[in-house]
Amino acid sequence: MRAQSESLTSSPYSLYGLGAINQSSIGRTNGMGFTGIGLKTSNQINNLNPANFALIPKGSFFYDIGIKGEYNQYSNKADSETKTTINFSNLALAFRIAEGLGAGISLVPYSEMGYSLIGIKTNIEGTDETFESNVNGIGGLSELKFNIGYSVLPNFRLGANASVLFGNIEENESFILNQSTFYSEETTNYSGIRFGLGMHFDVSENFTIGSTVQFPTSLKGNIKRSITKSLDGTEITVEDGASDTSANFNMPLEVGLGLSANLFETLTISADYKKNYWDATGQTESLGSYADQDIYGIGLEYIKDPRGYKYADRIRYRTGFNYDNGYLSINKKKVDGYNFTAGIGIPIGHSQKSMMNLSYSYGSKGQIQNILIKENFHLLTLNFSLEDLWFQKRKIN
């Protein structure tokens, strides 16, 4: 069975909480195992550590816009299905304010929901009879992030960010019982602000370590509910657009540690470790609970000659691996996943600061066991990472 989905994602695991948490970032990091906390770069936007914005060169203004397409295949013991989704992945810009001081703004999907559950059987209380219902959800949250980075010393940089999280989740349920049709629609709007810090330290010219922290916060929820039923062709509104406060969604403390090394001017190695403390949030689900999450990633980038005269010498080749032990525990079994990534950075013109970044990821999540679902997916991202030069003096021959 194949389908083209208009939702942001088609992952069955997006039915939990705020939906499936977005992994992809900006530009080159998508092809390097989604790593970049310790990645020192002055020619593209690195949205994974605010401290890196201190490295924006004088007169440079960076843009990055991206799209992504995802092909999902998921299966259980009885059936399998495939879906394809295409979606906006990011819009970002970065600029220098003063010597050693840079800033940036980005808009990315934080979470994505898009699921359908068909033919759910429910017992009628007090009887042996059952009825079937269909449930689907769509929506997700966006993250508008403001970053600033400052060079305290030539080899030591600090950064800070503030994120505005906002969006809504729409969930619909319909069923037929005794010749009556029931339909309910719930739309939950979430919003909140989150703060974070970052650090970069150059141990040497070619070796950098970095760290990040995102502080816990609570997203406020507001829910609107509509319920209608139809009896003998006559539609009756039971509840129409009633608004009420929803339980807050608690976001965890997140810490990250990363490192990068440049070898022989041709090879860059990047490695990250992230820990998300979901246990402390107290978040629960009807079918499971939230658990502390560990994410490991490693990435490589190779370029034959960064200043080469030949165009082919300046193309960047990337690969990486990412493992996530999961933040959802269902029947005491965590839903883990992994990604293999590959990418290429194609220079636009003669500049090394304008590039088309194409990345591919193959991943898997969950497993065919009990009520769990095995999900395999292919993710393709395309980013245009561009530089505009400001305040440059015109040269006259």
Image: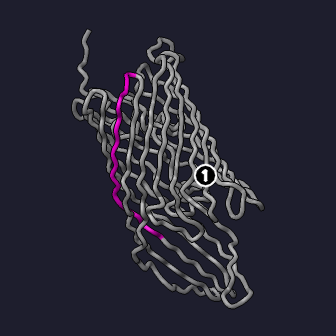
Q: Can you give x and y, in whole percent of width and height, for residue 199 in the image?
A: 34, 38
| Magenta stretch holds residue 323 | no
Q: Can you give x and y, in whole percent of width and height, for residue 178 in the image?
A: 69, 88
Image point 47% across, 58% down: which residue? 278
- Label 1: element kind: loop
Amino acid residing under circle 1: Asp
Q: Is residue 260 left or right of residue 157?
A: right
The quadrant of the picture occupied by the N terminus is bottom right
Image point 60% across, 85% down: which residue? 230
Figure check: 99 above or below 236: above
Return the residue nearer the eye: 132 or 384.
Answer: 132
Figure check: 41 above or below 137: above
| Magenta stretch holds residue 193 | yes
Which range is magenta? 187-205
Return the residue nearer the eye: 51 or 259.
Answer: 259
Image point 37% across, 22% down: which residue? 205
Q: Can you give x and y, in whole percent of width and height, for residue 218 in the image?
A: 38, 63
Q: Can you give x and y, in whole percent of width and height, for residue 281 in the image?
A: 44, 63
Residue under label 1: 336
Name of the residue lying farthest toward the bottom: 126
